[in-house]
Amino acid sequence: MAVLTGLVNWFGNFPARGDETKREGIEWCDVWMTHGNEQALPRVLLIGDSVTRAYYGQVEKKLEGKAYVGRLATSKCLGDPALLEEITTVLKQYHFDVIHFNNGLHGWGYSEEEYAKAFPDLVATIQHGAPEAKLIWATTTPVREGKELKLAAQTERVRARNKIALANCAERKIPVDDLFGLVVEHPEYSSADGVHASATGITAEAAQVVEVIERRLKEAK
């Protein structure tokens, strides 16, 4: 097993470097692969951020005996070339049968126009690195605020990014795991920070992720 870990800074300042890449105050990447020396089962990769990392453990457990499940969780966002570099590096190491991917809760220094411009490159990078993999796009979950965990203004940007992603996926016939739709009417699925999922939310998200992955695994056979 190999793991690279770091901390999350969700809504800090995002100063631009000379190459116009917008960086967060703290950046991190977490790559985790199990059964790296085995090939008896299909291999699944979850690409996302700390929300993905949170439900990964339950997804892996529920798919035990059916697939090997790895993860690439990162703070890198669409528009940052480092995101594509990280994905490319991981895809070079293993053959993946199913890839469940998301990106949308980082990189608020990038406009939605920049997000839209970068989304096709994300898909192209995954398809180039794993041409035989069945893909699943996961919608980005909402942002909440306050003790009552009401939807924050930031959620409108999440909606806009989801709309962009859904249009791209529809054009490419990529199935969608609508995690936004799953949790948006359930504030109890959110933790107190308004970004990450509560224990109840993690369980609900993991169950839906497993369901869509199992369908794609059947198609991959």
Image (spheres, rainbow, N blue to C red):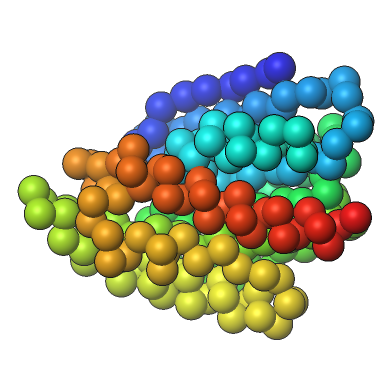
Which quarter shows the N terminus?
Answer: top right
- Asked if residue 38 is positioned above or below residue 100 in the image, the reply reads above
Residue 124: x and y, percent?
77, 62
Q: Residue at x 64, y 44 (%)?
A: 46
Q: Is residue 175 left or right of residue 10?
A: right
Q: Residue at x 33, y 43 (%)?
A: 200
Q: Residue at x 46, y 36 (%)?
A: 54
Task: Indicate the quadrant where residue 35 lies.
Answer: top right
The residue closer to the viewer here, 134 or 21, is 134
In the rendered picture of this protein, how many numbered marks are placed on residues?
0
Which quarter shows the C terminus?
Answer: bottom right
The residue closer to the viewer here, 213 or 51, is 213
Residue 4: x and y, percent?
59, 22
The residue closer to the viewer here, 21 or 84, is 84
Residue 9: x and y, percent?
34, 37
- Asked if residue 8 is positioned above or below residue 140 in the image, the reply reads above
- Asked if residue 156 is positioned above or below residue 71 in the image, the reply reads below
Residue 151: x and y, percent?
21, 63
Please identify the residue farthest to the top as the structure is shown. 1
Q: Is residue 81 visible?
A: no
Task: Indicate the quadrant where residue 45 lies.
Answer: top right
Task: Indicate the quadrant where residue 202 lies.
Answer: top left
Q: Is residue 181 visible?
A: yes
Q: Is residue 15 left or right of residue 60?
A: left
The residue closer to the viewer here, 210 or 1, is 210
Q: Is residue 64 left or right of residue 14?
A: right
